[in-house]
Image: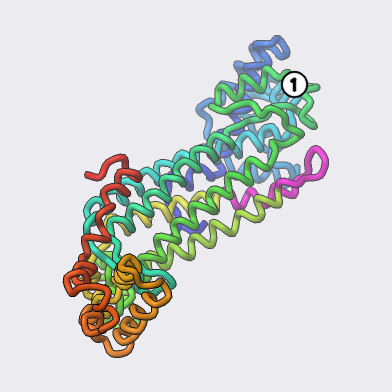
Amino acid sequence: MIPRYSRPDMVAIWEPATKFRIWYEIEAHACDAMANLGVIPRANADAVWTARDVEFDVARIDEIEAETRHDVIAFLTHLAEHVGSDEARFVHQGMTSSDVLDTCFNIQLTRAADILIADMEGLLAALKRRAFEHKDTIRIGRSHGIHAEPTTMGLTFARFYAEMDRNLTRLRTARDEIATGAISGAVGTFANVDPRVEEHVCAQLGLAPEPISTQVIPRDRHAAFFATLGVVASSVENVAIEIRHMQRTEVLEAAEFFSMGQKGSSAMPHKKNPVLTENLTGLARLVRMTVVPAMENVALWHERDISHSSVERNIGPDATITLDFALARLTGVIDKLIVYPDNMLANMNKFPGLVMSQRVLLALTQAGVSREDAYRLVQRNALKVWETGCDFKTELLNDAEVTAALSPAEIDEKFDLGYHTKHVDTIFARVFGTAA
């Protein structure tokens, strides 16, 4: 990803120097295990660890690869330059390139998942804080973009909290599923490398041994990982879209923080555009773009091919770096989001009383009016409000058929806002475990 949408900790996971350091650790731990088993001399295994503090020369490895056309061989050649060709002759004993590549890739994805999990925990904290801050802030709920019935801004934040909490569970599951390693040799049979080598390497690197690999770790694991990132990205967009709608001029129920000196438009000085959440919508598309290729990587020829390789070299960094940036950006947006409670009430009352139509409908049916007639009575008065902006309650009170079934006091009672917020505490207790 370009630096504009990158954060250093996640970028560092995908740097060539980090990759080569992981490759080195895999090879060194494998040599240790082989020495413990008596397969190679202990002195040779110890010699590999003399490169523990070496800064591997990425340019030199690239130079060797330009000749060998093989990245792992290029690295092993460079490693031998540091520890000595004789001392390094048992490095990679019985192993195949995918043992190193796949185990490394899964380590990188696991580390990336740890950052994403921390990102999500930060976002959840911000959403929870804003939810309780605006638990009782009335706003109109909308369906199809049209006024429906009253809700609260706190419930909006709580809804997003619950969704992101599910995503936190998904990320943790994806991390667990991807945290496997394989040191099983060509076609995965352990013919030339003892299974105990794999067990040792994985234990040292915080992985579980892959129960059965071919020459590669099964790619359904990776498909599930990237699919999870796609779901998280879609949830980011879900929040971003709501904020973008709320920031529209004719709505203005909430808005991104506009810093001192910020400019909204090169042509129109009055503009305050929702640029951060629009950016998040775009970034979500980029993350989801990696999901289908990851799915297509599941089907490889026989025990292996490398059709997945070029895909993963791109989508691994791109998806994780982009999502890390997006989660951090969304957390900042939520933290600083400006909420306009007065505008929320004004919007709800744009068509006075209209949003209470269902309460009147239900009251009429409970008073003995058929549902068909009750709907007709309520709708004809509601349409007057749509057309003229008159007061819904006043129209009902002037409708003889309505007042024949409901008294003025009964009609008036149906316009109590508290009716729509009476279960907010119950919902909060379900989401957060407490309503206070």
- For image coordinates 81% across by 44% down, the residue present is 301
317 in relation to 212, above or below: below
- Tell me: residue 70, above or below residue 202: below
Depth order, front residue of 390/65: 390
**On the rendered structure, is 236 left or right of 334?**
right
Q: Is residue 314 magenta?
A: yes
Residue occupying the point 45% across, 54% down:
6
**For residue 67, side relative to residue 291 (left or right):** right
Please state which amino acid type lies under the numbered disc 1: Val
Instruction: Tell me the magenta residue range.
Output: 298-316
Residue 134 found in image quarter: bottom left
Residue that extends furthest to the bottom in the rendered view of this protein:
388
Q: Mark 1 falls on what kind of element?
A: loop
Would residue 358 be seen by someone viewing this image from the given angle? no
Q: Position of residue 372 (x, y in %)?
A: 43, 75
Disc 1: which residue: 193
User: Residue 37 at what x, y percent from top left?
Assistant: 69, 11
Q: Viewed as shown, does residue 166 lie left or right of 306?
A: left
Q: Quadrant of the C terminus?
A: top left
Give the residue displayed 66% in from the left and 24% down from the top. Answer: 84
Q: Which of the two residues, 284 or 307, is positioned nearer the viewer here?
A: 284
Rendered residue at 29%/76% (across/down)? 354
User: Is 95 positioned to the left or the right of 280 in the image?
Assistant: right
Q: Classify 10 Å Cα crowding around label 1: few (below 14), some (14-19), many (20 and above).
A: many
Camera sees residue 145: yes
Name the image quarter holding residue 27. top right
Q: Position of residue 87 (x, y in %)?
A: 67, 20
Taking 311 as reference, is 181 above or below it? above
